[in-house]
Image (cartoon, helix red, strand yellow):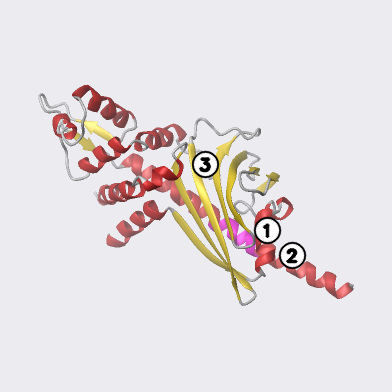
């Protein structure tokens, strides 16, 4: 519905990444600061390979980055894809506002015609 | 920057809520939403047209719209009616689609549009709520704290905007 198909792959991978409750919880944890993979795994009943899989999905969606510092390689949240989600919401808002402007005009037009019609009959 | 932050939070939490009072009786506004010949006349931004509009107005029934941009690009959308209480309330899903009504695989996003129509002394107050969520997750997703999570993330987003 929005006019521009702005970066559809990005948005759908963001949505797909956000669709999982564990991944949302991971992002929620990272919202309060960077954390190591071990730290991230702790609150969940997950093995390290299990958590790594989730982190890979988040990384591919560009929602997190992982540091290269040896040993603890901290994960960090990236705001940009989330901003794209917010922009998408903003596009829909404009879409409806403009449609409502047209609906307003159209309803006036229909009623004017009805009145004219009533006058004739 | 608090205002900016609040706005972002509100957007992600409740998605879009728009209220407008139309100077027309409720029955007419309802018709404008539910009959193709009316709907096609106003749906979409200024300069857009709606060459195809099919509405099967019953719970579980589908609609299929084609919106054409001034440049001639077509945007198809489809969805299913979830709730129909004439002339008070209309709830439907919405997804991007192709001309045969198949949901666009590159854009697997199903949204839900709820519209309420309130009579107000010969005029009609329309409240539209448009909630976005990933396809296939439906309402369970919203109940499972999707909104809360996004809300929390929006705070981070607001911070990164300031940075």
Helix, strand or loop for disc 1: helix
Q: Position of residue A96 (x, y in %)?
A: 54, 55
Q: Earlier in the sequence, mark 2 or mark 3?
A: 3
Q: Which residue is mark 1?
A: B32
Q: Pointer 1 indicates a residue of which chain?
A: B
Q: Is residue B147 above or below residue B29?
A: above
Quadrant housing the C terminus of chain A: bottom right
Residue at point 49% right, 45% down?
A: B111
* Quadrant of res B67: top right
Residue at (20%, 25%) from the top-left corner?
Answer: A47
Label ID, residue A110: 2
Q: Are marks 1 and 2 in contact (CB under 8 Å)?
A: yes
Highlighted magenta segment, given as a residue range: A97-104
Residue A99 in percent (x, y) is at 59, 56
Looking at the image, residue B4 sits to the left or right of residue B72; the answer is left
Residue marked by disc 3: A4
Q: Is residue B157 left or right of residue A90?
A: left
Query: For the residues carrying marks 2 and 3, which lies nearer the camera in this image?
Result: 2
Q: Answer whether residue B31 is magenta in the image.
A: no
């Amino acid at each position: 519905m929005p006019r521009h198909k702005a970066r559809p792959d990005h948005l759908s991978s963001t949505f797909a990444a956000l669709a999982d409750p564990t991944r949302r919880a991971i992002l929620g944890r990272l919202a309060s600061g960077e954390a190591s993979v071990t730290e991230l795994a702790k609150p969940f009943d997950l093995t390290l390979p299990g958590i790594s899989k989730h982190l890979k999905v988040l990384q591919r969606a560009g929602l997190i980055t992982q540091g290269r510092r040896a040993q603890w390689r901290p994960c960090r949240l990236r705001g940009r894809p989330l901003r794209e989600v917010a922009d998408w919401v903003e596009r829909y808002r404009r879409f409806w506002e403009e449609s409502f402007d047209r609906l307003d005009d159209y309803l006036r037009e229909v009623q004017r015609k009805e009145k004219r019609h009533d006058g004739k009959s | 920057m608090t205002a900016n932050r609040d706005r972002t939070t509100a957007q992600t939490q409740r998605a879009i809520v728009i209220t407008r009072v139309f100077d027309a009786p409720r029955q007419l506004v309802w018709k404008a939403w539910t009959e193709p010949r009316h709907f096609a006349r106003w749906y979409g931004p200024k300069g857009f047209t709606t060459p195809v509009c099919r509405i099967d107005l019953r719970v579980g029934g589908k609609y299929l719209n084609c919106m054409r941009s001034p440049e001639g690009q077509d945007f198809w959308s489809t969805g299913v009616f979830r709730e129909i209480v004439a002339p008070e309330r209309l709830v439907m899903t919405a997804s991007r689609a192709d001309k045969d009504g198949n949901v666009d695989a590159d854009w697997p996003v199903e949204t839900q549009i709820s519209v309420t129509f309130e009579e107000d002394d010969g005029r009609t107050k329309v409240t539209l709520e448009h909630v976005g969520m990933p396809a296939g997750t439906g309402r369970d997703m919203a109940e499972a704290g999707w909104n809360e999570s996004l809300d929390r993330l929006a705070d981070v987003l607001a911070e990164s905007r300031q940075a």
